[in-house]
Amino acid sequence: MKSGFSKQSPHSHPTFFSRRISNTLTFGLAMLLFGSIMACSGANETTPSVDASSVQVEDTGLSPDILEPSFEHLALLASVSNNVISPLLGDFQVLTHDLHATAVVYADLVHNGETDTAEALADLQSSWSSTMDTWQELELLQIGPAAAVSEFVGGEGLRDEIYSWPSVNTCRVDQEIVENVFADDIFFEQNLVNVYGLDALEYLLFYHESDNTCSSLVKINSDGLWAALNDTEKAQRRVDYAVVLTESIKEHADQLLLLWTEADTGFTKQLSEAGLDTSVYETSQLAMDELFAALFTLDTVVKDKKMAIPLGISDSCSGDICVDELESRWAHYSKENIIANLKGFQRAFLGGAPPDGDWGFDDALVEAGAEALAQEIKEDVENALSVLEGMPDSFLEHLESADGQAQQAYEAVKKVTDHLKGDVPAVLKLEIPKEAAGDAD
């Protein structure tokens, strides 16, 4: 685990503004003003203005609007950090500990030769689903330690250690069942993320047939290694593998929560104080752009990969539909994952739990004179949730029946993501991430 975060220079960042608060604006004054904002940052209140004339700045030739410290940014970033990300990470940690404990109970029954393990398996599957619900909300908030190392400030790539979809390879999981070395200390160091995490665990918990998902040419089949295992051996290895994976997931949940909540160096503090000398973020603008980029997961991943590809409306699907590209093939939990993704987006947009939240993007839009836009986005999110929650069957079943409900859900989500590429970045002066900038759909 890294002991802290190094300050990242934004000079290479496309939205870098050369703003420097002079030494006359001390950290104490900044935090005093920031505290006043947070005390007044209810969902229906406006942010108090700051007299720019009292703040001395270096003469960089830029406009005063750019040079002024953005306390509106600080209020929003602190709200999302403290009211959304940290509480969700706390919930996720508790759920992963329960998941591991439930896996151990089920494993003991399997190894003891108990014939009636259905209830214990159902409990384990339910625990996986609950854990996944919370993680899928966090999927829309991959900023800081969970984010990719080379793409975000403070990124440590912990997201992929916990859940690496769409980098999923169930044949590799089958091969590890045969090799039977997943309990070795160096297992995680020697293998790619597609053999562990919540996605690999889904396959182990929800697929119990005697065959495997590898082709006949793969060694475990061509050399008869899989066939040499009897059903009892396969069941025991699957559950032992599951216990190892839940232990790893639990440890990474502990690590991620600690990285966010450490009093002096935690990322909650880093994000809340973006642009101050105490933060790894050189500017609050940089932090806002990265948070906005994280929310774009709803567009580039949820809409484009989880929905458009299986629906067959993406060039990445060569058939009428592509059910093998669904996110949750084994638990048939794709619809529920998308619902959780929307709830995570909603929390971040509102700056807290719905319906009122705290200081969020909606309040920032209102401050910028775009109250109608803020209200429209809130209504579009609620509508998308209503459409998905109203689907009586799994996403797979609606795809296969071609009843139009999966398409309707896609269109409802697209209404939300269209705002991200439309008026929101223009009004709030946010940068559209490069992977979405050329996407017109």
Image: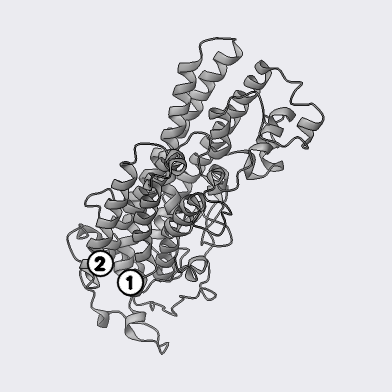
Position in image of residue 326 (x %, y %): 51, 44
**Vertical relation: 333 (above or below) 116:** below
Q: Which mark is residue 415?
A: none
Q: Image check: 277 left or right of 107?
A: left
The amino acid on which the numbered mark 2 sits, given as a three-letter code, is Leu
- The Cα atoms of the two marked residues, 1 and 2, are separated by 8 Å
Q: Which residue is mark 1?
A: 423
The amino acid on which the numbered mark 1 sits, given as a three-letter code, is Asp
Which residue is rendered at x = 44% and y = 65% of the image?
A: 441
**Vertical relation: 126 (above or below) 381:** above
Q: Image check: 191 left or right of 217?
A: left
Judging from the image, what secondary structure is the residue with disc 2 in? helix
Position in image of residue 406 (x %, y %): 40, 47
Residue 29, visible in the rendered structure = no
Position in image of residue 230 (x %, y %): 70, 17
- The image quarter containing residue 248 is top right
Q: Are marks 1 and 2 in contact (CB under 8 Å)?
A: yes
Q: Which residue is mark 2?
A: 373
